[in-house]
């Protein structure tokens, strides 16, 4: 018997019952966190982001394809246009399904995860608004990176040297996975991760600042124009700042099968290949800025209008009250 009157067996039994209590406590905390965190998410934000992306991609894919050729080959806009014209209309929208699928899901995640994460940080942790926006933007951008396989296949389908290898999106997916494994679909993840996280943080901070500081327009047309211009200027500026990361990503993803080089090594290689001039990293940037201006203007306007539509309360018709005396007459 021990000094406190408890047998060793009883002491052992006591120590054995403690872990389940701790596990239940941890499980309870995890359950509360899950409930609070995911409870902050609103499905309307996901739906609005999805709809905005659909409208945008349908309108701007041909412009993207010209920019892609400039990124990949370092050619002029006239040369890229000549390539697409020579290939014909049948190839113009080739590869559109991956960006359409990727962007609808991506923007859905971007707006939905940002709003839910920001709401959770502000309401549960009392984090200041700017800090919450930055963290939520990085979290949303990181979550978007799981969709990289769509960008990977889009690159293969848009590159002319792979035209004879893949007939469509599903064929490209099957070929890559069968011959090189799932890891090949995530080639170029590093520049995408940095691009998504930082650009999202900048976008949401600037977008909400513009929304708060710009004058409130009463007419629908002036309000729509302001939403378009605000989204367009912010999106085009951010896209231009992070354009070199897209160049590195496209360069990495234009190869297949062999060991992928790191982002920094790819950056130095592209620098040497383009006459050791930093300005040559921005080949196609002017056209990309124009596309981003239109693209983000459309997305911001579509998102805001879809959000207003979803949050609009249905008007219940007012039934005029009639007294029993008047009704009897």
Image (cartoon, grey):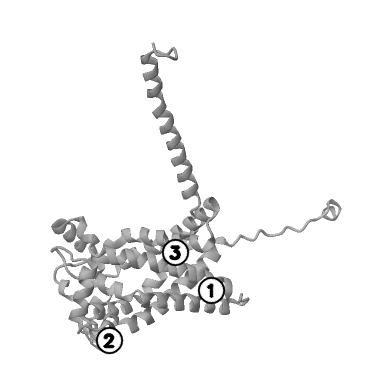
Outermost residue toward the front? 3
**Residue 297 at x, y percent in the picture:** 45, 76
Q: CA distance from mark 1 to mark 2?
A: 33 Å
Q: Choose between 139 and 150: the one closer to the eye.
A: 139
Q: Residue at x 25, y 87 (%)?
A: 76
Q: Quadrant of residue 216?
A: bottom right
Q: Choose between 140 and 175: the one closer to the eye.
A: 140
Q: CA distance from mark 3 to mark 2?
A: 31 Å
Q: Mark 1 vs mark 2: which is more N-terminal?
A: 2
Local crowd size for mark 3, using a 10 Å CA cut-off: few (<14), some (14–19), many (≥20): many
Q: Can see residue 209?
A: yes
Q: Quadrant of residue 103?
A: bottom left
**Residue 243 at x, y percent in the picture:** 32, 76
Q: CA distance from mark 1 to mark 3?
A: 19 Å
The numbered disc on residue 210 is 1
Residue holding disc 2: 77
Helix, strand or loop status at disc 1: helix
**In the depicted structure, whether residue 122 falls above or below residue 294:** above
Helix, strand or loop status at disc 3: helix
Q: Can see residue 156?
A: no
The numbered disc on residue 49 is 3
**In the depicted structure, whether residue 273 falls above or below residue 314:** below
Q: Quadrant of the N terminus?
A: top left
The numbered disc on residue 173 is none
Helix, strand or loop status at disc 2: helix
Q: Choose between 243 and 53: the one closer to the eye.
A: 243
């Amino acid at each position: 018997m021990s000094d406190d009157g408890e047998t060793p067996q009883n002491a052992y039994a006591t120590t054995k019952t403690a872990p389940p209590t701790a596990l239940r406590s941890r499980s309870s905390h995890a359950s509360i966190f899950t409930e609070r965190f995911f409870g902050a998410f609103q499905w309307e934000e996901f739906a609005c982001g999805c709809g905005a992306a659909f409208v945008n991609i349908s309108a701007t894919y041909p412009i993207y394809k010209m920019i892609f050729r400039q990124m990949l080959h370092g050619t002029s806009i006239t040369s890229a246009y000549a390539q697409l014209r020579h290939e014909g209309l049948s190839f113009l929208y080739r590869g559109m399904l991956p960006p359409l699928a990727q962007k609808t899901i991506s923007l859905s995640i971007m707006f939905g995860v940002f709003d839910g994460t920001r709401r959770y940080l502000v309401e549960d942790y009392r984090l200041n608004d700017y800090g919450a926006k930055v963290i939520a933007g990085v979290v949303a951008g990181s979550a978007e990176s799981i969709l990289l396989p769509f960008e990977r296949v889009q690159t293969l389908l848009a590159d002319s040297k792979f035209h004879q290898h893949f007939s469509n999106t599903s064929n490209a997916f099957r070929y890559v996975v069968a011959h090189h494994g799932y890891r090949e679909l995530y080639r170029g993840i590093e520049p995408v991760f940095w691009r998504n996280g930082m650009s999202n943080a900048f976008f949401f901070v600037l977008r909400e600042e513009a929304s708060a500081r710009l004058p409130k327009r009463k007419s629908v047309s002036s309000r729509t124009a302001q939403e378009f211009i605000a989204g367009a200027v912010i999106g085009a500026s951010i896209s231009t700042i992070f354009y070199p990361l897209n160049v590195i990503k496209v360069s990495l993803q234009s190869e297949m099968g062999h060991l992928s080089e790191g982002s920094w090594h790819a950056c130095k290689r592209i620098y040497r290949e383009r006459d050791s001039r930093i300005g040559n990293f921005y080949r196609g940037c002017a056209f990309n800025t124009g596309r981003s201006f239109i693209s983000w203007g459309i997305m911001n306007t579509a998102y805001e209008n879809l959000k207003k539509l979803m949050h609009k309360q249905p008007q219940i018709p007012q039934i005029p009250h009639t007294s029993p005396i008047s009704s009897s007459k």
